[in-house]
Amino acid sequence: RMQLLLRENLASLGRMAAGIAHELGNPLTGISSLVQLVKRRRRDDSFIVEQLNLVHDEINRLTRLTHQMVDLARPEDTGKKNFDIMPSLNKAFQIARLDPKLRKRIVKMPGDAPPVLVEANEDAVVQIVMNLLFNAADFTDENGLITVEVKHGADAMVEIRVTDNGSGIPEADQPHIFDPFFSGKKSGEGAGLGLSVSHSLARSFHGSLELEKSDPGGTTFLLKLPCKGT
Ligand SMILES: Nc1ncnc2c1ncn2[C@@H]1O[C@H](COP(=O)(O)OP(=O)(O)OP(=O)(O)O)[C@@H](O)[C@H]1O
Ligand SMILES: [Mg+2]
């Protein structure tokens, strides 16, 4: 779980870096044009031109750096392949169950079922489902019930639902749950990254993650993954 959190933190740091890099782009473009303008006005002063050329080189260097930062954080499309979702769900369950809290919940996994092929990144799917299981465990009491269901939905998407009978998400919190660093847990207990990372991962292979239902009786998250066209 530590490793998972570390990976999530890195991913979110990457997105933050990309956000900053992107915002740096605008002032850099502005400074660059101003330097060009002054250079043209003072083209007879060789000392000024020389200094401004240095400034310009440095601006270019910063611009390249910001592009690199954005590239680094771009969720890769790589690692996308067709696979049967059922063993991945099981894998997520097996790993998540190492967490003592989850072991004290009743988890109903889909029973023996024919293969359900999806097109996604297998590691990422395991990570998303684990995050949903951890959250479900965090917000249910001991002996709480968590259910994982799979079915073919509309628009060639496979639908995976993770449902718990826990406390539900307060209505005021619902619009924020996918924001990075939003956590409804006591301060220090949640990084608030699980859902935001899972949401970006799902989108990176053209799936989606949404809150389908939440009330004081429990919560259902719906993960949709592109299904392999037959
Ligand atoms: N199944 C759930 N039941 C009730 N509230 C939930 C559930 N899942 C998510 N939430 C709410 O959404 C918030 C954000 O969830 P998220 O997984 O992103 O962060 P976290 O669990 O607080 O921290 P982290 O996952 O980084 O350890 C939670 O803190 C909680 O308030
Ligand atoms: Mg979480």
Image (cartoon, rainbow, N blue to C red):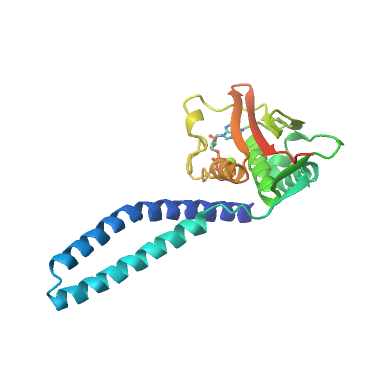
Q: Is residue 78 left or right of residue 33?
A: right
- Who's the residue at 43% across and 55% down the image? 17
Compare residues 130 and 68 and report the one nearer the observer.
Answer: 68
Tell me if residue 51 comes above or below residue 164 in the rendering: below
Q: Is residue 55 left or right of residue 172?
A: left
Q: Would you identify the image quadrant in which residue 90 lies? A: top right
Q: Is residue 94 visible?
A: no
Ligand 1, seen in the image, is in the quarter at: top right
Image coords of residue 172 (percent x, y): 46, 26
Image coords of residue 93 (percent x, y): 75, 43
- Who's the residue at 86% across and 37% down the image? 114
Q: Would you identify the image quadrant in which residue 168 lies? A: top right
Compare residues 203 and 164 and report the one nearer the observer.
Answer: 203
Compare residues 223 and 98 and report the one nearer the observer.
Answer: 223
How many numbered discs? 0
Tell me if residue 47 comes above or below residue 211 in the rendering: below
Q: Is residue 25 visible?
A: yes
- Who's the residue at 31% across and 65% down the image? 59
Image coords of residue 184 (percent x, y): 50, 35
Compare residues 14 and 115 and report the one nearer the observer.
Answer: 115
Image coords of residue 216 (percent x, y): 59, 21
Q: Quadrant of the C terminus?
A: top right
